[in-house]
Image (spheres, coloured by chain):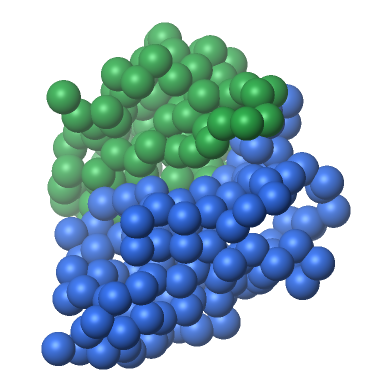
Amino acid sequence: DTAVSQTPKYLVTQMGNDKSIKCEQNLGHDTMYWYKQDSKKFLKIMFSYNNKELIINETVPNRFSPKSPDKAHLNLHINSLELGDSAVYFCASSQRSRDRDRNYGYTFGSGTRLTVV
Amino acid sequence: AQKITQTQPGMFVQEKEAVTLDCTYDTSDPSYGLFWYKQPSSGEMIFLIYQGSYDQQNATEGRYSLNFQKARKSANLVISASQLGDSAMYFCAMRESPYGGATNKLIFGTGTLLAVQP
């Protein structure tokens, strides 16, 4: 079973279109994230949800709208796509905890390569 | 502001040799966690190793070890006995607090591309 699964893996679309990327995790984690990896491989956080509550909202154009129907799912909808939106988008999940002895790292999905033409 | 710096854009290593990938960080938080991830050409992000700021010993995971020097704010990754399959991009990352309570925001360095030569 895939721990964090994203669909689709590849997405090619024209400028101006609206598209969505879906993410699901079966790890029982309470926090999910969207990261963007640009053409230079730099990874930057976009959004994070904890138990369906938005807790991180970085400086992202409001054409990007995350939605978390439950703590196992986090979707990303992008309106009016632009050439500069072309990137790899990673979903990730983790567990928030105050337990100092454990590693609560991130588990990443395999990424969605978005190409806007 | 928190920051992760990886000064080596690319490195070569001969198969079976050891290699050290550098990572320095900057944070004013007393509590933080440091991670290394591997990204092969296939694109997935693979967790390698974790070091908590209060951990007394350097972390080790198989052929990976983390050379943690807290006073110097460095967390270098050491890969022993390099294999051809180790060729990949390696990212150092830091989380605000390994113990929750904060946003668990993970920030990444710019990565080091490692090429293992036969």
Residue drawn at (26%, 51%) of the image:
B44
Residue drawn at (24%, 63%) of the image:
B40
| x and y percentages locating residue A71 in the rendered image | 44, 13
- Determine whether B93 is above or below B110 in the image: above
Residue drawn at (26%, 89%) of the image:
B14
Q: Quadrant of the N terminus of chain A?
A: top left
Q: Residue furthest top?
A: A70
Number of numbered markers: 0
Residue A81 visible to the viewer? no
User: Is residue B58 shown left or right of residue B99?
Assistant: left
In the image shown, does A57 or A28 lie closer to the viewer? A28
- Determine whether B55 is above or below B82 in the image: above
User: Is residue B34 shown left or right of residue B118?
Assistant: right
Q: Quadrant of the C terminus of chain A?
A: bottom left
- Determine whether B18 is above or below A105 in the image: below
Residue B101 visible to the viewer? yes
In the image shown, does B48 or B65 lie closer to the viewer? B65
| x and y percentages locating residue A73 in the rendered image | 36, 18
Chain A tint in image: green
Residue B116, by quadrant, is bottom left
| x and y percentages locating residue B56 in the rendered image | 70, 50
Residue B98, by quadrant, is top right
Chain blue in the figure, letter: B
Q: Residue furthest front?
A: B57
| x and y percentages locating residue B100 in the rendered image | 67, 28
User: Is residue A38 shown left or right of residue B59?
Assistant: left
Residue drawn at (43%, 75%) of the image:
B112
